[in-house]
Amino acid sequence: MGKIISVCNQKGGVGKTTTVVNLGYYLAHKGKNVLVIDLDPQANATSGLGLDKSKIEKSIYDILINNLNPVEAMQEINMPQLKLIPSNVHLTGAEIELVGFMNREYRLKQALKEIVDEFDFILIDSPPSLGILTINSLAACNSVLIPIQCEYYALEGLSQLLNTVNLVRANLNKDLEIQGVLLTMADYRTNLTSEVIDEAKRFFKDKVFKTIIPRSIKLSEAPGFGKPIHLYDKHSIGAKTYLSLANEILGEPVILEDEEAWKKEFSVEA
C-alpha cells in the first residue's frame, strides 16, 4: 500500500506547493510511482506541473463532490511514474458544498481507497487553511509534512496546526503521524535563518529534516515555466536540496550543501 503524505501549513507562502511538485518529481525520478493531488483551489501545483488550470475538465472537485473515479481525473506528468489529479477554480466552492455531505471529512479517503495500492507515494498539496479540505487531507493521509519558512513569526500559528493534527488523530485518523518538519526559504546571509533553524530543532527535535531548502531564485522561477526544478535547472542548489529531501524520505544518503556553496550560487542567481 502506498504512503499518503499531506503537505500542510495553514500559513501561505511557506513552500507547500514547491515541496509537493519537486519532492513528487524526484521520488518519481528515482523510480517510485507517485501521485500528486492538488487540493488547493489556487491550483498552483497544477500549473507548476505544466497544466493550464483554466482548461482542466476533470479535477479533484469532481472526485469529492460528484464521486468521479480518481483514475478519470489523473494526468501523466513528464514520466510514466508521475501522475497528477489537478485542481481548478471549481474547488473554491467545495468547502460550502461539502457541509451537506454525510461523512464529509472522509470524502478524499474513500476516493483514494480504490487507487492507493497503485502508488508508492501519494502527495497532497493542502490549501493554506484549516478548513474542510485540509481536514479531508489529514483524514486521508498516513503522515503530515510541515514546511516552515526561515523567517520572522515562522512558528506562529503552528500550535493551531498541531492541535488540529491531534484532533484529527483522536477523532478521524488514529494512525496520523508527523512525517517531518521541513525548513524552507533559508537565507544564510542572515542571523534570523540560524535562529529559526535552532528554534525549530528545539521545538520539534528529531522531526526536523536534515535537508534545509534554501531561498533560491531558480526555485521561484521554475513554476512560471510549468516545470519542476530538475527540468528547469537541475544543477541549482534548489534542485540538489529537493533531491536530498527525496533521499531522506527514502532512507538514502542525504546531500547536504554548505552555506558557502549556497552563498556562491545565490550571488550568481541574484
Image (tube, grey):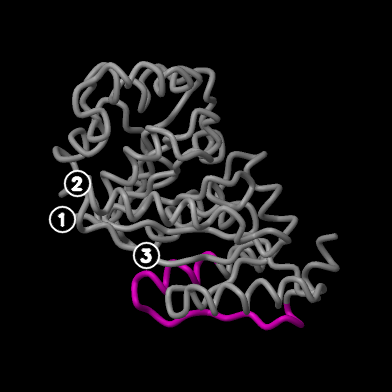
What residue sits right under mark 3 in the picture? 179
Looking at marks 1 and 2 on the same chain, the residue that comes earlier in the sequence is marked by: 1
What residue sits right under mark 1 in the picture? 1
**x 40%, y 18%: residue:** 96
**x 61%, y 62%: residue:** 184
Classify 170 as above or below 242. Answer: above
Classify 258 as above or below 168. Answer: below
Q: Position of residue 263 (x, y in %)?
A: 79, 75
Amino acid carrying label 3: it is Gln
* Mark 2, secondary structure of its residue: helix
For marks 2 and 3, give the CA distance: 18 Å
Please identify the dominant SS of the magenta region.
Answer: helix
Query: Is residue 247 one of those drawn in magenta?
Result: yes
What residue sits right under mark 2 in the picture? 116
- Badge 1, how many Cα within 10 Å: few under 14, some, many 20+? few
Query: Is residue 62 one of those drawn in magenta?
Result: no
- Badge 3, how many Cα within 10 Å: few under 14, some, many 20+? some
Looking at marks 2 and 3 on the same chain, the residue that comes earlier in the sequence is marked by: 2
